[in-house]
Amino acid sequence: MRVNHVGEICAQALYQSQALFGRSEDLRRHFEHAAEEELDHLAWTAERLAQLGTHTSRLAPFWWAGAFAWGSLAGIAGDRWSLGFVVETERQVEAHLASHLDRLPAEDAQSRAIVDQMKREEAEHAEAALAAGALPLPAVVRGLMRVAAKVMTIVAHRV
């Protein structure tokens, strides 16, 4: 659940930076709305971590700063590229959450419900970005994003 919480910290930073650099008012509103929706995920995961008697990642400011940088680059690249970044991010997050559901114990109904709801909403964010005109990212960018996510997952799980 700590990794999911870090993912939600990153989602806040990504959407905030993309809203900051968005060129159209509609896109800025789109990102601000998505960030508001992700606040629920952030609260759910933080609460679940507390219930499980564990801590959030001690590297939260680092994760936020890194995600803000990635989102800024996407925003600077242009609105349609920024939307493409959302699509790829949300697809990768959705895959992570699906694998997390596979690993969660069946008896942990509360964590499973949180992860399942988050997975559905992340898919909706990807679809909304596609509908808004997202451009597909180059394979090299998608690969870099996967590597960054893997590093984040491994480190956040432990720290």
Image (tube, grey):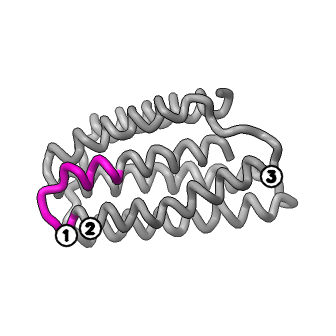
Asked whether residue 18 is drawn in magenta, I would say: yes
Asked whether residue 159 is drawn in magenta, I would say: no
* Circle 1: element type: helix
- Cα distance between the residues tagged 2 and 1: 5 Å
Using residue 134 as the reference point, say whether residue 151 is left or right of it: right
The answer to which image quadrant residue 29 occupies is bottom left
Residue bounds of the magenta highlight: 15-27
Using residue 26 as the reference point, say whether residue 109 is left or right of it: right
- Cα distance between the residues tagged 3 and 2: 34 Å
* Circle 3: element type: helix
State whether residue 113 is above or below residue 59.
Answer: below
Total residue callouts = 3
* Circle 2: element type: helix
Using residue 117 as the reference point, say whether residue 69 is left or right of it: left
Identify the residue position indicated by label 3 in the image: 51
Residue 127 screen position, x and y as percent: 36, 69
Residue 91 screen position, x and y as percent: 43, 55
